[in-house]
């Protein structure tokens, strides 16, 4: 039993966190959303505010709502939340706590006739798209593309976010006849984006996380300095490359173990036969101690 749990620790954590943060079950029954005090609190992953079961707010949605509000100038709480979570966990959130990451992981497990791709053509350039989306759709447009009274819109949530479509748009439209009648081009557009990403998720691992997600872009910037990190023991490493070959995100683990693209899934550690890879909060302390030891030796 212990071995079974250990082998499925990440999946259990993903399912458990998704259930906890989307535990307002009356919302799914009534086609409504929870509006209690907990909605003022951000959760780490891309968890849509409008999901019928959501008990907290998505940090990207909250950030856009604050930046676009004519009565506010800076999202102190949301930015502080992202800084703390990023500095502590980095993209561990993507690999272990994000509900839409769980959806992509489950899709990747579905057998598909076409051979699984390691990456899409133009992968190196496509990985920068998420930073452009973060800059333009999360920051610039909500702040400067405002209406006549100076109010901005949550552009990423409104025009791109497939998590919002899956977790909020589809359930709410299905449960509310009035919304079904009002659904138009924008709804069709977002359903189309979701369908494309679902199809891509069958042949390449986590396309949304790789190329589109602005939350992953933020957390990824913290990966090289986050307290939760990967460490390579050079004395044990045989430079066989097994860790890089096992990485589903195509990170060159041997050369860049704390790359902004790493979601801390642990596949590299499992593939390392010599046991040269370790992952966790203690790794940062060991790296610091080793660096200090090396400095004294010099």
Image (cartoon, rainbow, N blue to C red):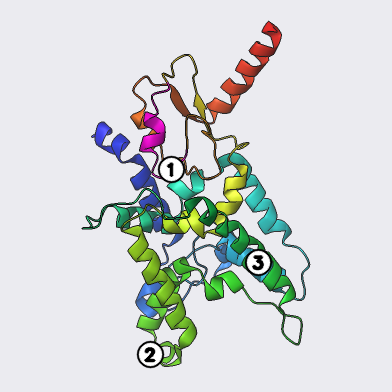
Figure check: 192 above or below 13: below
**Mark before the other along the chain sequence, 1 or 2:** 2
Residue under circle 2? 177
**Mark before the other along the chain sequence, 2 or 3:** 3
Looking at the image, which is closer to me, 238 or 263? 238
Residue under circle 3? 136
Q: Residue at x 39, y 46 (%)?
A: 13
When asked about the image quadrant of residue 277, the answer is top left
Mark 2 Cα shell of 10 Å, populated few (<14), some (14-19), many (≥20): few
Looking at the image, which is closer to me, 293 or 281? 293
Mark 3 Cα shell of 10 Å, populated few (<14), some (14-19), many (≥20): some
Q: Is there a contact, CB below 8 Å, between mark 3 and mark 1?
A: no
Figure check: 278 above or below 258: above
Q: Main secondary structure of the magenta part?
A: loop
Q: Residue at x 50, y 18 (%)?
A: 234
Q: Residue at x 42, y 91 (%)?
A: 178
Q: Which mark is residue 231?
A: none
Callout count: 3
Which stretch did the figure color magenta? 239-251
Q: Assign the N terminus to one quadrant of the image.
A: top left
Viewed as shown, does residue 277 lie left or right of 63? left
Looking at the image, which is closer to me, 260 or 245? 245
Q: Is residue 25 visible?
A: no
CA gap between label 1 and label 2 equals: 44 Å
Indicate the position of residue 65 as horizontal and vertical percent values: 65, 70
Q: Is residue 36 magenta?
A: no
């Amino acid at each position: 039993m212990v071995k079974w749990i250990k082998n499925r620790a990440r999946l259990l954590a993903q399912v458990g966190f998704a259930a906890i943060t989307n535990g307002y079950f009356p919302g799914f029954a009534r086609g409504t959303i929870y509006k209690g005090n907990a909605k003022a609190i951000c959760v780490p992953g891309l968890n849509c505010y409008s999901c019928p079961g959501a008990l907290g707010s998505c940090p990207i949605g909250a950030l856009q709502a604050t930046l676009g509000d004519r009565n506010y100038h800076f999202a102190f709480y949301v930015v502080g939340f992202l800084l703390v979570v990023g500095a502590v966990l980095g993209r561990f959130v993507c690999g272990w706590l994000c509900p839409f990451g769980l959806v992509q992981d489950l899709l990747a497990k579905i057998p598909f006739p076409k051979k699984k791709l390691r990456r899409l053509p133009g992968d190196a350039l496509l990985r920068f798209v998420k930073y452009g989306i973060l800059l333009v759709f999360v920051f610039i447009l909500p702040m400067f593309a405002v209406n006549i009274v100076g109010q901005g819109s949550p552009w990423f949530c409104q025009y791109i976010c497939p998590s919002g479509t899956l977790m909020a748009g589809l359930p709410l439209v299905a449960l509310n006849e009035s919304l079904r009648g009002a659904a138009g081009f924008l709804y069709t557009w977002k359903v189309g984006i979701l369908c494309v990403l679902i199809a891509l998720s069958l042949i390449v691992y986590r396309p949304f996380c790789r190329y589109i997600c602005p939350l992953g872009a933020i957390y990824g910037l913290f990966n090289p300095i986050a307290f939760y990190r990967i460490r390579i023991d050079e004395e044990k490493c045989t430079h066989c490359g097994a860790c890089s070959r096992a990485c589903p995100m195509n990170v060159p683990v041997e050369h860049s173990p704390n790359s902004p693209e790493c979601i801390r899934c642990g596949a590299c550690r499992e593939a390392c036969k010599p046991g040269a890879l370790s992952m966790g909060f203690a790794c940062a302390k060991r790296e610091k101690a080793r660096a200090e030891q090396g400095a004294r030796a010099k």
